[in-house]
Image (tube, helix red, strand yellow):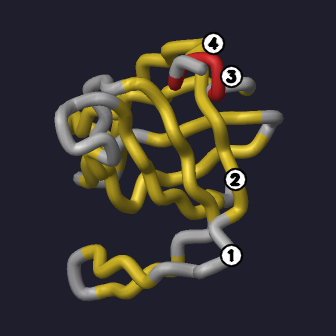
Amino acid sequence: MAFTELLAQTCTVVERTKVAGGGYGRSGYSEVLVPDVPCLMQADLRGREIKVGAEVKIAGFILYLDNRALTEQDQIEQDGQRYGVLQVQDAGGQGHHLEVLLERVRM
């Protein structure tokens, strides 16, 4: 069975780029939506701790997808929920696929 056959779900990758002029002197983000990306999302029952700057966040979800350009600045949308990318790992070891740790984002 090929890896892509295991990706039984789809999600939207929200590619976020920081831009000036978010209002009141703050920066904001421009977003480009990449819909219908094959993926597999599962609850991460281990609740891994991820250090993000000075904060420690708990990953509640794990996402598997083909190797693609994805950063911790991006977000994922699936079934009306949005998730922040905490960590992107090359899970196959040779650019085969990504293992992405996520947290739910309030919209």
Q: Are marks 4 and 2 in contact (CB under 8 Å)?
A: no
At label 1, the amino acid type is Leu
Where does the N terminus fall, quadrant-wise? top right
Q: Are marks 3 and 4 in contact (CB under 8 Å)?
A: yes
Q: Secondary structure at mark 4?
A: strand
The residue under the point 30% across, 29% down is 96
| Horizontal and vertical percent position of residue 74 | 38, 40
Among the 4 quarters of the image, the one containing residue 61: bottom right
Instruction: Give the spatial CA distance, label 2 vs label 3.
Output: 13 Å
List the single residue furthest toward the front: 1
> What is the number of the mark on residue 10?
3
Q: Secondary structure at mark 3?
A: strand
> What is the number of the mark on residue 36?
4
List the single residue furthest toward the right: 79
Question: Which residue bears the numbered disc 2?
Answer: 42
Within-10-Å neighbours for mark 3: few <14, some 14–19, many 20+: some
Instruction: Give the spatial CA distance, label 4 vs label 2.
Output: 17 Å
Q: Secondary structure at mark 2?
A: strand
> What is the number of the mark on residue 25?
none
At label 2, the amino acid type is Gln
Within-10-Å neighbours for mark 2: few <14, some 14–19, many 20+: few
Question: Which residue bears the numbered disc 1?
Answer: 45
Instruction: Give the spatial CA distance, label 3 vs label 1.
Output: 21 Å
